[in-house]
Amino acid sequence: MSDRRTELESAPWGGRTRRYDLIKEGVVAVVIVAIVVAALSTLFGSPDDKQVTFKEWATAAPADFYATSVQELAGSSGTGGYGAPYNKASDGVNLGPLYLAKLLGVTHPVDTVNDFVITPLTTVSNAAPVADALKQWQASDVKTQSTWATNYDNALTKVSQDQAKVPAGNYGPVPELAAGLLTMAQAGSLDGALLSQGNYFQTDNTKQTLFLGDGSYFNDKSTASNLQGSTWGMMNETGRYPGQAWLWLYSFWYQIPPFNNGDSHPFGANADAWIMVIMGALSLGLIIMPLIPIVNRLPYKIKIHRLVWKNYYQEENL
């Protein structure tokens, strides 16, 4: 029976044929889609908001920017404690004993102290307060710098980021450095200073994105635009516009336990890694489905093809 079925399947097609111009159909389809896209773009425009700049952040939420600058100096920001591929501050997500990011190592080093604060300030160090603060900071050892920044970060957190209420303490030049960076950002010069680090033609916006993500302002704008994971943000444009719909396959898993339980569950704390494995396994299963015994015979049992080509089977009385 198996040999007979194989013979039938490999035999040349002996049924009816119909002329079909694939090129013509393709051209017509492309033209129609182009007209529809052009019309919809004209009517609705783009849902994308303007990019968030450091000037916007520092002007709209100066206290948040100031506190984030202090955290970058203290190494207590999200980037400062992220781990690979930016630094060695943590092990990162894991699959049991396997720490994926740690295995790859620090491939894109980011030093929050120098990259986000000190180096940009050196480009505008003519002002006396900033110049003196930089000299004091650079003349000190790393341990002393860390003590200053940590002390001020803790003190600022206790007064809800209100720098005017911070009591006197051993903060070194940290307040002046943070204030200088705030002034620089409000003047609009920080964006260019961060982008200019590296090659002459710089297209890597990683540092700017990480710095923005460490503060609350950028996160709050994402929440307002329904772009958080809890609102299926991976597949949304700003303002609930549909984005890459195929991403629902990934976004779905973030909406259900245990992946949406946060750090309270191992799967929640390492959701990115586990979801990657799940989607990888499902994708592999789809690819090798024709090779899986029993499964590859289901089309012959279910016979969905007869519904798709029902007109043909009716005409041929098959």
Image: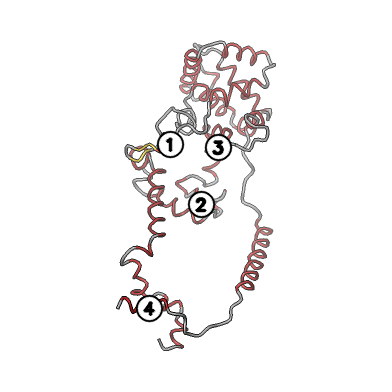
Disc 4: which residue: 7
N-terminal label among 2 and 4:
4
What is the C-alpha distance between the residues marked 3 and 1?
25 Å
Q: Where is residue 190 in the image (x, y as percent from the top left)?
A: 65, 28
Q: Position of residue 211 (x, y in %)?
A: 55, 31
Q: What secondary structure is marked by label 2?
A: helix
Placement of 137 over or under 288, stated as above or below: above
Identify which amino acid the numbered label 3 is placed on: Phe
Q: Closer to the camera, 100 or 223? A: 100
Circle 4 packing at 10 Å, graded few (<14), some (14-19), many (20+), is few
Disc 1: which residue: 101
Q: What secondary structure is marked by label 1?
A: helix
Horizontal side of residue 127 vs 99, given as left or right: right
What number is the disc on residue 218? Answer: 3
Circle 1 packing at 10 Å, graded few (<14), some (14-19), many (20+), is some
Question: Does the residue at mark 2 contact the one at mark 1 (Cβ under 8 Å)?
Answer: no
Going 40% across and 50% down the picture, which residue do you hit? 253
Identify which amino acid the numbered label 4 is placed on: Glu
Going 31% across and 65% down the picture, which residue do you hit? 293
What number is the disc on residue 132? Answer: none
N-terminal label among 3 and 4:
4
N-terminal label among 3 and 2:
3
Q: Quadrant of the N terminus?
A: bottom left
Identify which amino acid the numbered label 2 is placed on: Met
Horizontal side of residue 7 vs 13, given as left or right: left
Question: Does the residue at mark 3 contact the one at mark 2 (Cβ under 8 Å)?
Answer: no
Q: Where is residue 42 in the image (x, y as percent from the top left)?
A: 69, 58
What number is the disc on residue 235? Answer: 2
Placement of 305 over or under 225, stated as above or below: below
Identify which amino acid the numbered label 1 is placed on: Ala
